[in-house]
Image (cartoon, coloured by chain):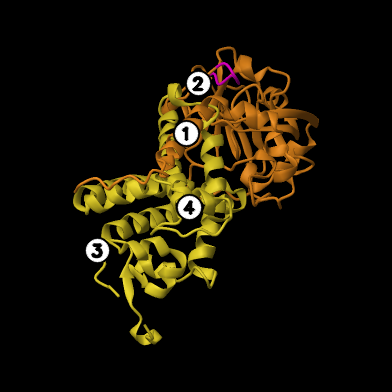
Amino acid sequence: MGRTDSEAVYLPRFTRTERAVHWIHASAFFLLLATGLVLYVPALSQAVARRPQVKELHLLTAFAWIVALGLVIALGDRRSLRATVSEIDRFDADDLRWLRGKKAPQGRLNAGQKLNAVLTSSFALLFAVTGLLLWLGERDTRFRLGSTIVLHDALMYVSLAVLFGHIYLAVVNPRTRHSLRGMTRGDVRRDWALEHHAKWVEAGSPHSSARQ
Amino acid sequence: MAPEPEDPGTRTYGRRAFVALSIVGLSSLAWARPVWDALGGVSSPLTSALPAGIVPSGGWRIYTVASSMPTFDPKTWRLRVEGLVDTPSSFTYDELRSLPRTEQVSTFHCVTGWTVEDVQWAGVRLLDVLDAAGPREEAEVLAFESAEKPYVDTLTLEQAQLDDVLLAYELDGTALPREHGAPVRLVIPEMYGYKNVKWVERIVVTASAAPGYWEQRGYDTDAWVGGSNGL
């Protein structure tokens, strides 16, 4: 093709609805993490002290998070979301090879990204259920289970580990960090996509205007 | 939109993983606590290797209800015992420390599900403080008012007779830290943490119990560990 970087071809990778879901989830997660850590870590509890207000903020964030996700689903491009869900659902032979650490061409989402999406959505459900139980348990002892807090905490530890990996790949690692652009501006360089998501480029993305 | 032709090698592992993970997670509401405890809980090598204050060290979590923690000034601090008593009394910190010292090792249970084992408390027996004031015949209930307003909780005079009910001024060999209720907190290991009032500054002897801070929010007045609050 012989193009220089300045005239690089970009392929649309994530729709606005997909990006909205991602960033709503990300901002809610950071706020919930920050307020949650203040409630949980003794040194922070002591330094910040305003526990009732921090707790209020934690609960409000959780509520806003669920409402915002509901709004995106109600008002956004549901077809694109359905397509994304079905894409995450399906693992082909190449995905399984990739997960075993072998080189295999990947679609728009690689197998690791699919797994991350599955884990994140399951954890979102479990965080919401345990959070609701903790909230209800303060009001009615029938809802208080000894294990709720153990699960809520364990989810936090695992999420934190996954988050570090996610941020490393999206922001730090030179080979993969170009993908961040897909989640901010929506598109990625075609040559980068060919290397990392060959099957997607070769199939021709359904909403792609860029063609060879 | 017509369904895409299925690649024969494609499997819907995504939804299966989601369902499996969610079921394991939800079922853990029934087994996470016993498993965690069996693994050694917070005293496991993993968590004890981390610096104190980073994770809830020794299992403690710091719960407060006001926007700032009370500060302890030994010069002005007093513990007052008032209400249905013969001689309303007031103790300075030094006076309290000069009463007979008692030590105990006990387990602290929070009603929200966390537990700290082998807590070393030192302090004075509650009865020693009470006897100095002399509760009257009609006295039934003790209300423990915290310097952290509006926290208050109660014990019956009968519950207060239990051997290990302390006003603790030391925790694990050092003066009670601020976040644990400096300078003095109530300790009644038989009951959940919310009865173990921190920053105690006033004990009011009454004839009947007014609901404490958490009792006003639906918690049991008699907070026996393992036998109250639905546990």
Q: Looking at the picture, which amino acid does disc 3 mark?
A: His
Is A68 on the left-hand or right-hand side of A51?
A: left
Nearer to us of marks 4 and 3 is 4
What mark, if any, has residue B20 been given in the picture?
1
Q: The chain coloured yellow carries which letter?
A: A
State the residue in front, A190 or A135.
A190
Badge 4: chain ID: A
Give the quadrant of residue A187: bottom left
What mark, if any, has residue B229 been given in the picture?
2
Distance CA(mark 3)–CA(mark 2): 57 Å
Mark 4 neighbour class, 10 Å CA radius: few under 14, some 14 to 19, many 20 or more? many
Distance CA(mark 2)–CA(mark 4): 53 Å
> Mark 3 sits on what residue?
A207
Q: Residue at x 52, y 71 (%)?
A: A175
Is B110 on the left-hand or right-hand side of B19?
A: right
Marks 1,2: beta carbons within 8 A:
no
Above-or-below relation of B95 to A75: above
Badge 3: chain ID: A
Task: Provide the major secondary structure of the magenta segment.
Answer: loop
Q: Looking at the picture, which amino acid does disc 2 mark?
A: Asn
Q: Looking at the picture, which amino acid does disc 4 mark?
A: Asp
Is B193 on the left-hand or right-hand side of A152?
A: right
Q: Secondary structure at mark 3?
A: loop
Highlighted range, magenta = B222-227
> Mark 4 sits on what residue?
A94
Residue B14, position in %: x, y?
42, 42
